Image: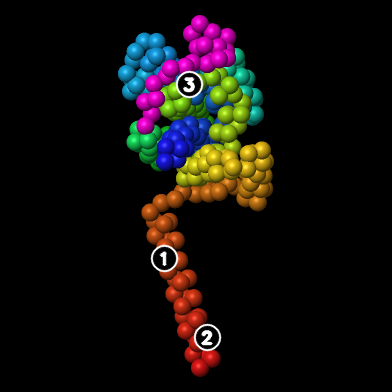
């Protein structure tokens, strides 16, 4: 049972980070391949505050979120003016630079060996509560004026500017919120694992987060959540296969993207209305099947 609880906590941490990246990539149209850097900043900030300064866990999470948000905002000032895929390349460099800096700050972060002795404060109720709050937070942003501005920038940056939207400012807001959520996820992750290394936040982690956004469907909160659950739980389910589990994991991911390029949800959301519509269609299908059986029985008689 403890193992399953741990997997759920990891899923919740990843959901928070993926939702932040989904806001930046899926709704604003800015691709980033270095988002694990913000998780690293949040993880090390929270760990240093609790281990070396004795901060309470909740306060450390707030500082971790704030530090990641500030760094994200500062990074966005010179980089968000770049056009096309250049921002993604810059963020790739930021991610690798962050990892190298953490590895070289031996006296502060423990270097490549990492930090030990972090209190495991992230429990299942805390992780689930924050993940649900993150989903509601992102949904409210998307349904607000800011969300409409983000989507306008995604569809056509020039047209958004012609409509009076300050695209540079909105991009900075999107990146700041995205970085803040990455920092929050990193703080939760550090205080669940109890031990962190810079290699945990390398390019592979950034690729994993980006894959979840694309796999779930760009512009879909529901898709990001579902994809994160699948991509986090699937390697654990395939663990008995040992050497072949990552091969199967990669094959399923590629096959899904090839067969359904728009992602699992394709920009759509799961709502109570859609669920009611699905239940109605299932009832109609079952009713038609029953009617067909009765008709076939009467014909035979």
Q: Where residue 215 sits: x, y (%)?
A: 58, 43
Q: Which residues are magenta?
A: 101-123
Residue bearing the label numbered 3: 195
Which numbered disc covers residue 160?
A: none
Query: Pointer 3: residues within 10 angstroms few (<14), some, or many (20+)?
Result: some
* Residue 257 at least partly seen: no
Q: Nearer the viewer, residue 145 or 53?
A: 53
Residue 199 part of the magenta-drawn span: no
Which numbered disc covers residue 280?
A: 1
Q: Is residue 55 left or right of residue 14?
A: left
Estimate the spatial distance between the alpha carbons at disc 3 and disc 1, rounded to whole Å. 49 Å
* Lower sequence index among marks 3 and 2: 3
> At 50% across and 42% down in the image, what residue appears?
229
For discs 3 and 2, the disc positioned in front in the rendered view: 3
Query: Pointer 2: residues within 10 angstroms few (<14), some, or many (20+)?
Result: few
Asked where in the image residue 123 lies, by quadrant, the reply is top left
Residue bearing the label numbered 2: 296
* Up-down relation of residue 297 to residue 80 (above or below): below
């Amino acid at each position: 049972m403890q193992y399953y609880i741990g997997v759920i906590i990891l899923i919740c941490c990843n959901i928070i980070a993926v939702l932040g990246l989904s806001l930046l990539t899926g709704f604003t149209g800015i691709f980033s391949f270095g988002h694990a850097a913000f998780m690293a900043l949040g993880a090390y900030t929270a760990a240093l505050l609790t281990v070396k300064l004795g901060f309470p866990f909740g306060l450390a999470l707030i500082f971790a979120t704030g530090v990641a948000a500030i760094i994200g905002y500062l990074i966005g000032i010179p980089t968000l003016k770049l056009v096309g895929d250049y921002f993604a390349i810059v963020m790739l460099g930021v991610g690798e630079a962050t990892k190298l800096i953490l590895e070289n700050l031996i006296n502060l972060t423990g270097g490549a060996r990492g930090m030990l002795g972090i209190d495991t404060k992230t429990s299942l109720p805390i992780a689930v509560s924050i993940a649900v709050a993150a989903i509601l937070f992102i949904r409210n942003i998307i349904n607000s004026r800011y969300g409409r501005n983000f989507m306008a920038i995604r569809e056509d940056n020039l047209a958004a500017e012609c409509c009076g939207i300050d695209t540079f400012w909105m991009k900075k807001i999107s990146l700041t919120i995205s970085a803040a959520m990455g920092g929050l996820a990193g703080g939760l992750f550090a205080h669940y694992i109890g031990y962190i290394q810079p290699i945990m936040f390398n390019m592979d982690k950034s690729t994993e987060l980006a894959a979840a956004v694309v796999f779930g469907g760009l512009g879909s909160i529901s898709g990001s959540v579902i994809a994160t659950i699948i991509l986090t739980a699937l390697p654990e389910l395939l663990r008995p296969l040992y050497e072949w589990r990552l091969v199967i994991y990669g094959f399923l991911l590629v096959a899904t993207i090839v067969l359904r390029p728009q992602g699992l949800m394709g920009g759509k959301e799961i709502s109570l209305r859609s669920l009611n519509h699905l239940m109605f269609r299932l009832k109609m299908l079952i009713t038609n099947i029953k009617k067909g059986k009765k008709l076939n029985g009467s014909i035979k008689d």
